[in-house]
């Protein structure tokens, strides 16, 4: 039901990695770097890699890939890890939708790497490549300067060409709804390895999750706890399951994703929280059923939806 699962932790049988449609494995847990502040990212990345994390998730748009690269370099120089032992994900930003390889090269240079394990389209919309800002070009009225003449399918065709360059091991997408994915797949030569989406018990997105499982596309969850200070941590069901296993509410929610076969991107710059986030347990089916029903009572809640003024096809936003 929840996809192909491999590499079980002998302590609690929660999987530590999942199989991609490329044949490679992707870690079940990664460190996120979105909104991590200057001066904090390097230590967080280095610490995570030195303490067992095998996946670092970053993006050109986050504006901190150079510092992510410094953290990676520190962990490598200390001999804590080898490059082949960890997985790096980055994302092509919307202003580079017609210049995909150029944006990839910028990320590789900033990160100090020869290749990226997984390169993703960040959002399926193009922004003016010659606008007034490299990341968020705007029109005189303050709205985002979009390039509606360029299709995400054209962007994907450029993504596919990257695979033969050796600069990426796999390619995928982010924030794709059923509508967008069904529009892409008939035109794709390479099926996306991953669809990274906002996902948590308030926003299970069962429609796109089910389609991705059917097409052997792995789901990655960003904002897996909802929002910072999310009320999800105070949900009675989450607190009850946490008490049952004597773990934190965050561990319960991360374990919920793990049971669904979803790679979790857990963001923190605090060493204690990075340690805590790495604890995953194997929930039973009764717990899963209870957690999967949370949104039915609490309602659907989406926390990340940039002001593109574009209908991306998500049922809760369309």
Image: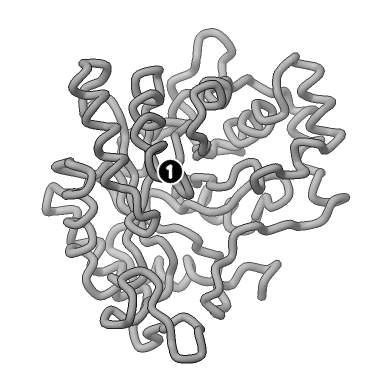
The N terminus lies in quadrant: top right
Task: Count every numbered label the image shows and give the total.
Answer: 1
Residue 215 appears anywhere in the view: yes
Q: How is the image coloured?
A: one colour
Q: Residue 60 in the image: x percent, y percent?
A: 32, 56
State the residue lying farthest toward the bottom.
Answer: 140
Residue at image point 47% right, 66% down? 181
Q: Which residue is mark 1?
A: 33
Element type at mark 1? loop
Question: Is residue 224 or residue 138 the one in the foreground?
Answer: 138
**Viewed as shown, does residue 61 lie left or right of 10?**
left
**Viewed as shown, does residue 116 lie left or right of 147?**
left
Residue 191 appears anywhere in the view: no
State the residue lying farthest toward the front.
Answer: 39
Residue at image point 53% right, 54% down? 197
Is 217 situated above or below 257?
A: below
Q: Residue 184 in the image: x percent, y percent?
A: 41, 69
Is 246 situated above or below 4?
A: above
Q: Residue 4 in the image: x percent, y percent?
A: 48, 34
Is 244 situated above or below 27?
A: above
Question: Image quarter for residue 2?
Answer: top right
Residue at image point 44% right, 34% down? 30
State the residue lying farthest toward the top.
Answer: 11
Is 251 situated above or below 194?
A: above
The C terminus lies in quadrant: bottom right
Question: Is residue 11 or residue 134 the one in the foreground?
Answer: 134
Q: Residue 252 in the image: x percent, y percent?
A: 69, 28
Residue at image point 46% right, 53% down? 195
């Amino acid at each position: 039901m929840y996809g192909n699962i491999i590499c079980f932790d002998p302590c609690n049988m929660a999987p530590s990695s999942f199989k991609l449609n490329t044949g490679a494995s992707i870690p079940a847990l990664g460190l996120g770097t979105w909104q991590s502040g200057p001066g904090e990212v390097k230590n967080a990345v280095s610490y995570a890699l030195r303490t067992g994390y095998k996946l670092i998730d970053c993006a050109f748009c986050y504006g901190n890939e150079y510092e992510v690269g410094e953290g990676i370099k520190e962990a490598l120089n200390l001999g804590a890890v080898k490059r082949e032992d960890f997985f790096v994900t980055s994302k092509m930003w919307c202003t580079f939708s017609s210049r995909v390889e150029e944006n990839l090269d910028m990320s590789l240079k900033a990160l100090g790497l020869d290749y990226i394990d997984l390169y993703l389209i960040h959002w399926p919309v193009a922004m003016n490549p010659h606008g007034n800002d490299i990341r968020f070009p705007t029109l005189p009225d303050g709205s985002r300067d979009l390039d509606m003449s360029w299709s995400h399918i054209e962007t994907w065709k450029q993504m596919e060409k990257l695979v033969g360059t050796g600069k990426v091991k796999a390619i995928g997408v982010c924030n794709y709804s059923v509508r967008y994915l069904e529009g892409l797949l008939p035109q794709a030569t390479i099926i996306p390895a991953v669809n990274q989406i906002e996902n948590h018990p308030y926003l299970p997105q069962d429609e796109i999750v089910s389609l991705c499982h059917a097409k052997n596309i792995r789901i990655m969850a960003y904002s897996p706890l909802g929002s910072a200070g999310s009320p999800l941590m105070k949900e009675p069901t989450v607190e009850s399951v946490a008490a049952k296993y004597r773990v934190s509410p965050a561990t319960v929610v991360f374990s919920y994703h793990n049971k669904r076969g979803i790679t979790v991107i857990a963001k923190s710059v605090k060493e204690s929280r990075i340690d805590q986030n790495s604890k995953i347990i194997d929930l039973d089916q009764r717990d899963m059923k209870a957690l999967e029903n949370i949104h039915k009572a609490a309602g659907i809640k989406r926390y990340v939806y940039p002001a593109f003024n574009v209908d991306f096809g998500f049922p809760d936003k369309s």
